[in-house]
């Protein structure tokens, strides 16, 4: 069997999406405090290992096999170990799907920076992917409840989610919100609690995310015409969102920031993910602008409602994910002259379908994530001690530091000195509106 052009493109796309998780590690690592940077990065990297194993053994079957439990999930035993796919081209698409599951769970980690036990995270990841991500992916993409064949889809209409507005971003954002409430706020948390320790690292991470996102959105393109639309929309929406975020900063704070630019890019990428094949380039600009402004404003809500979302996963992924998912109901292009969003004369049908899918995702993820998180907190223990939090989770969880410094004043007799991250980097005021 020879490789087709489609096979090659999906393989390349899968590699691009896999690169996004190390890119996310740079992105989150730069935004963390110096004494938690390595922990933040390794939480993304270990997600690749844990989810990769789950996907091969039972995860893929749960997203694509014949449904069980009334269309909630695929049969996890149907494709156990993927042995039946050896010798077929199916493994190309299976690998592509794995990269989506990996990045989704890695996104959650940014919300609980500085205070999470690494062992608890390694327990949470495979359980959450199994009980939350895989069922939701099946319900949306595998023929389950939210698809055209499912009970909810037949009743309210099928929601459009080309690359993961519900399955990836709303899902991760809701899970992040639940976790921060279960873990609680960091000691001393409040406005001006800390600032990112390495903004250039954040910018590198954002660049890698944007690069990989062309595979994230474009990997499932069914034709050259669709691929072209997806590519342009994946450029246009984050461009507009970046400008929108920086405009909010300029009006609210007096000046735009590089961190805000990077965050705006991610917000726009999140918003266009479900809509990339369904809106026009002008529609993608509108969607991106709303998402950039909305996410920039939304990150301040954590101070109003008292939840310590360390790297603003909720403000960006949940809010921009909702904007992108619901926005399809207004901006979706008609297909062969029929349907489309409200602004294209398609009526309320698509908008209702998008809202129902978004609400269902929020409720489903919130309930199951809360049960999982509470069980881990009551057994393994989810949060480090106050002492370990103070000295930094890099040391307490990994016995490492992100940075080793040369000889400084005050050396000990053996020529060494323990220098905390805060001694070197300080712990200044974060500019509100710059974080993901």
Image: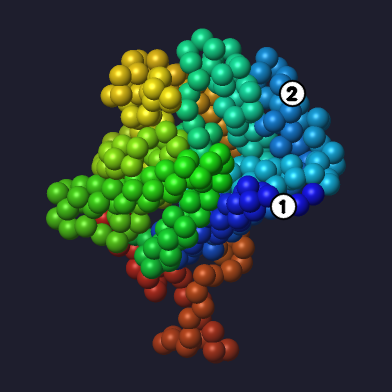
Q: Is residue 297 left or right of residue 306?
A: left
Question: Residue at horizontal 50%, vertical 35%?
Answer: 162
Does residue 60 show up?
A: yes
Q: Is residue 89 left or right of residue 433?
A: right
Measured from the top left, where is residue 204 in percent x and y? 43, 65
Residue at numbered disc 2:
66
Question: Residue at horizontal 47%, vertical 13%?
Answer: 156
Q: Residues within 10 Å of mark 2 (few under 14, many from 20)?
A: some
Measured from the top left, where is residue 395 in percent x and y? 56, 65
Foreground residue among 277 and 16: 277
Label 2 vs 1, first from the N-terminus: 1
Residue at numbered disc 1:
3
Between disc 2 and disc 1, the foreground one is 1
Distance from label 2 to label 1 (Cα)? 28 Å
Q: Quadrant of residue 291?
A: top left
Q: Count numbered badges in the picture.
A: 2
Question: Residue at horizontal 64%, vertical 38%?
Answer: 129
Q: Quadrant of residue 325?
A: top left
């Amino acid at each position: 069997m020879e490789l087709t052009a489609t096979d090659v493109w999906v393989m390349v796309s899968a590699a691009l999406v896999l690169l996004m998780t190390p890119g996310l590690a740079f992105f989150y690592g730069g935004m963390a405090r110096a004494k938690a940077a390595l922990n933040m990065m390794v939480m993304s990297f270990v997600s690749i290992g844990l989810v990769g194993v789950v996907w091969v053994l039972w995860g893929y079957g749960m997203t694509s096999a014949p449904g069980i439990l009334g269309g909630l999930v695929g049969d996890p035993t149907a494709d156990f170990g993927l042995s039946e796919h050896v010798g077929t081209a199916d493994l190309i698409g299976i690998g592509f799907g794995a990269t989506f599951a990996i990045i989704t769970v890695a996104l959650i980690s940014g919300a609980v920076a500085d205070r999470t036990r690494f062992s608890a995270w390694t327990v949470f990841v495979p359980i959450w992917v199994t009980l939350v991500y895989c069922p939701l992916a099946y319900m949306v993409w595998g023929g389950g409840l939210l698809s055209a064949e499912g009970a909810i889809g037949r009743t309210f209409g099928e929601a459009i989610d080309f690359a993961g507005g519900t399955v990836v971003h709303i899902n991760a954002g809701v899970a992040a919100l639940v976790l921060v409430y279960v873990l609680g706020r960091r000691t001393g948390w409040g406005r001006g609690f800390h600032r990112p320790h390495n903004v250039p690292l954040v910018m590198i991470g954002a660049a890698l995310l944007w690069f990989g996102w062309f595979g994230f959105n474009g990997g499932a393109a069914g034709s050259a015409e669709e691929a072209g639309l997806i590519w342009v929309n994946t450029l246009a929406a984050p461009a507009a969102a970046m400008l929108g975020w920086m405009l909010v900063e300029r009006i609210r704070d007096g000046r735009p920031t590089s961190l805000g630019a990077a965050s705006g890019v991610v917000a726009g990428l999140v918003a266009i993910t479900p809509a990339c094949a369904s809106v026009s380039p002008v529609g993608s600009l509108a969607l991106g602008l709303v998402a950039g402004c909305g996410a920039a404003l939304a990150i301040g809500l954590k101070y109003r409602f008292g939840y310590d979302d360390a790297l603003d996963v909720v403000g960006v992924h949940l809010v921009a994910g909702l904007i992108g998912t619901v926005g399809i109901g207004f901006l979706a292009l008609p297909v062969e002259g029929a349907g489309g969003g409200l602004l294209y004369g398609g009526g309320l049908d698509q908008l209702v379908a998008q809202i129902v899918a978004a609400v269902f995702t929020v409720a489903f993820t919130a309930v199951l994530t809360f049960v999982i998180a509470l069980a881990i907190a009551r057994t393994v223990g989810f949060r480090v001690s106050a002492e370990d939090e103070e000295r930094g989770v890099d040391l307490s969880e990994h016995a490492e530091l992100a940075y080793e410094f040369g000889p400084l004043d005050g050396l000990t007799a053996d020529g060494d000195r323990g220098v905390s991250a805060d001694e070197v980097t300080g712990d200044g005021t974060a500019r509100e509106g710059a974080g993901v």
